[in-house]
């Protein structure tokens, strides 16, 4: 009974946060509203529940949403960006780790606290290697929350001028091919090739995505639920020449749960301990923003990406929240998910290597 009450409270508080933030016109209102309200509830010691079956539904929904938009063409420039980004993430993680270590944090904690991705997974791997998982979680939680709060504000500032510039001949001339968020053009011919998903299509997409996500998760593939559902939706949509689109209210509800799940990581114990780590945390955050800026610049210059997609692709926060915010703010979620998954797998691989040699 208590679990069901905790679940209902989690859902109600997350959705309330989204609706209030939306009313206040705060960017990425579904994710940030859910996170902010759940943080407050958590700090007030309200018992909340976020069961594994709801996590599963959220992951599958995110995979379907991203998979329905997958249209990436991997050319030489994009391949170069992917490689550069992986190197930047790995090199940046190591750099921050050495700096944090120099500021007085023990070696293992410093290196794991500085890994740029996978809060839950990094904390779990740290505990498996018997490192200080609590301190690692504090660093990782602060990184994720700070980025989730600041990046949408930055995105709003850089995306507004870009959108004004894009109100162009294309909007006045339907024959012209407007540019998609990822910098690719979608003309009349492209639209004619796709059709709306029918009821049976949605049943197949939902069932197939759930099955693929469940299978990869059982095979212990990292982010298996997300990858499985994303891949199935992308393949099925391409085969059937569909352009499925989730109901916006339903999808924003799911996004509020994504934000709420992040908020659950912020506890009173972690807040109380933060002052002891304030200097290394601030320094690491400054370095993170520097690494993000470098990544953002080369994604625009080499990858020819729009500013919003480049920003969220280079965001070193949570995997699912970053993709969710990109969707909410008009970025190309297929590109963003590619770079976020590259970051995720690079960091997990680095964590396993570091754990085995330290």
Image: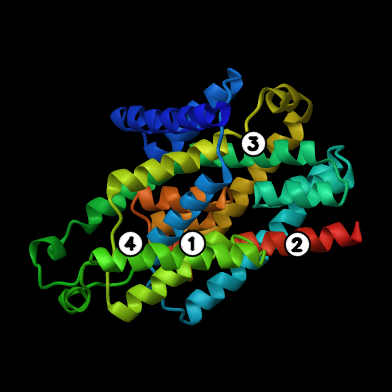
Badge 1 density bin: few <14, some 14–19, many ≥20, Cα 10 Å: many
Identified at 74% across, 46% down, the residue is 123
Q: Position of residue 45 (x, y in %)?
A: 61, 19
Name the mark on residue 350. 2
- SS for dot 2: helix
CB of mark 4 within 8 Å of CB of mark 2? no
Q: Using the numbered discs, state the Cα–Cα distance from disc 4 to disc 2 in whole angstroms.
A: 31 Å
Q: Position of residue 220 (x, y in %)?
A: 67, 64
Q: Quadrant of the N terminus?
A: top right
Q: Position of residue 249 (x, y in %)?
A: 29, 43
Question: Can residue 64 be seen in the rendering of this structure?
Answer: yes
Image color mode: rainbow
Name the mark on residue 35. none
Residue indicated by mark 3: 142
- In front here: 304 or 254? 254
Q: Earlier in the sequence, mark 1 or mark 4?
A: 4
Badge 2 density bin: few <14, some 14–19, many ≥20, Cα 10 Å: some
CB of mark 1 within 8 Å of CB of mark 2? no
- SS for dot 3: helix
Residue indicated by mark 4: 181
CB of mark 1 within 8 Å of CB of mark 4? no
Point out the frontmost of discs 4 and 2.
2
**Horizontal side, residue 204 vs residue 151: left or right:** left
């Amino acid at each position: 009974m208590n679990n069901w009450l905790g679940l209902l409270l989690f859902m109600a508080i997350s959705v309330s946060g989204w609706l209030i933030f939306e009313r206040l016109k705060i960017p990425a209102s579904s994710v940030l509203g859910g996170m902010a309200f759940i943080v407050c509830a958590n700090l007030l010691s309200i018992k909340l529940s976020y069961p594994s079956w709801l996590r599963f539904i959220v992951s599958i929904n995110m995979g379907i949403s991203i998979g329905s938009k997958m249209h990436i063409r991997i050319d030489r420039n994009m391949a170069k960006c992917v490689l550069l980004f992986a190197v930047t993430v790995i090199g940046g993680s190591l750099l921050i780790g050495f700096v944090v270590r120099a500021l007085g944090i023990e070696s293992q904690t410093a290196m794991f606290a500085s890994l740029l991705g996978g809060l839950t997974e990094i904390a779990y791997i740290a505990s498996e290697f018997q490192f200080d998982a609590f301190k690692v979680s504090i660093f990782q939680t602060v990184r994720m929350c700070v980025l989730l709060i600041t990046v949408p504000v930055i995105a709003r500032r850089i995306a507004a001028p870009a959108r004004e510039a894009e109100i162009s001949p294309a909007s006045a001339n339907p024959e012209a091919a407007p540019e998609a968020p990822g910098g690719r053009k979608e003309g009349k011919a492209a639209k004619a090739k796709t059709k709306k998903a029918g009821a049976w299509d949605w049943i197949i997409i939902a069932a197939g995505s759930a099955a693929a996500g469940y299978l990869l998760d059982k095979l212990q593939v990292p982010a298996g639920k997300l990858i499985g559902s994303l891949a199935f939706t992308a393949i099925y949509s391409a085969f059937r020449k569909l352009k499925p689109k989730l109901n916006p209210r339903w999808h924003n509800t799911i996004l509020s749960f994504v934000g709420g799940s992040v908020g659950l990581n912020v506890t009173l114990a972690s807040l109380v301990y933060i002052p002891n780590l304030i200097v290394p945390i601030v320094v690491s955050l400054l370095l993170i923003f520097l690494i993000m800026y470098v990544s953002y610049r080369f994604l625009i210059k080499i990858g020819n990406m729009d500013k919003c997609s480049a920003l969220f692709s280079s965001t070193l926060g949570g995997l699912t929240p970053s993709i969710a915010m990109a969707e909410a703010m008009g970025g190309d979620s297929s590109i963003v998910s590619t770079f976020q998954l590259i970051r995720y797998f690079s960091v997990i691989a680095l964590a396993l290597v570091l754990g085995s040699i330290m």
